[in-house]
Image: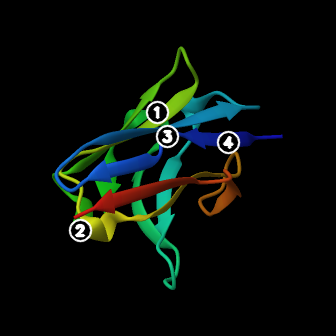
Amino acid sequence: QVQLAESGGGLVQAGGSLRLSCAVSGRFVSTMKMGWFRRAPGKEREFVGEISRNDVGTRYTDSVKGRFAISRDNAKNTVYLQMNSLKPEDTAAYYCSTTSRFGDQYTYWGQGTQVTVSS
């Protein structure tokens, strides 16, 4: 059973940075497609970005391109979301997710970590 646990959220001023972590158990992160999503109060869940299996590539939603970056540390079995130049509109609960072993739909979710950006 795959389990995901996010950490690293907090309160930061606009223009600041945070790095979120997603610790993975039950499968090797190097073989996994991993995504980050967020949900702001009163809004639907939004795709933030993802890293493909075996580090073929990453992609991001337009609003975070050039500011956010996803990476993974295979030795720690952890995926990261580095967030720079944060804006108040980045305030949300952030979730990491992964697919089933050979599927493409996001199936497993962490509990989320709150990011609040003050202006």
Nearest to the eye among marks 3 and 2: give it.
2
- Label 2 vs 4, first from the N-terminus: 4
Which labelled disc corresponds to residue 53? 3
**Quarter of the image with the N terminus in it:** top right
Q: Residues within 10 Å of mark 4 (few under 14, many from 20)?
A: many
Q: Nearer the viewer, residue 103 or 3?
A: 3
SS class of the residue under badge 3? helix
Q: Are marks 2 and 4 in contact (CB under 8 Å)?
A: no
Residue type, label 2 = Ser
Task: State the residue at coordinates (58%, 42%).
Answer: 6
Mark 4 and 1 residues: CB-CB less than 8 Å, in contact?
no
Q: Amino acid at mark 3?
A: Arg
Marks 3 and 1 sit apart, C-alpha to C-alpha, by 4 Å
Q: Is residue 61 visible?
A: no
Residue for badge 1: 54
Instruction: Please name whichever residue, 7 or 65, is drawn nearer the observer in this view of the structure.
Output: 7
User: Which numbered disc covers residue 77?
Assistant: none
* Contact, mark 2 vs mark 1 (Cβ under 8 Å): no
Q: Which residue is rendered at x = 52% and y = 82% of the image?
A: 44
**Amino acid at circle 4:** Leu
Count residues near mark 2 (Cα–Cα under 10 Å), then give few for <14, some for 14-19, many for 20+. few
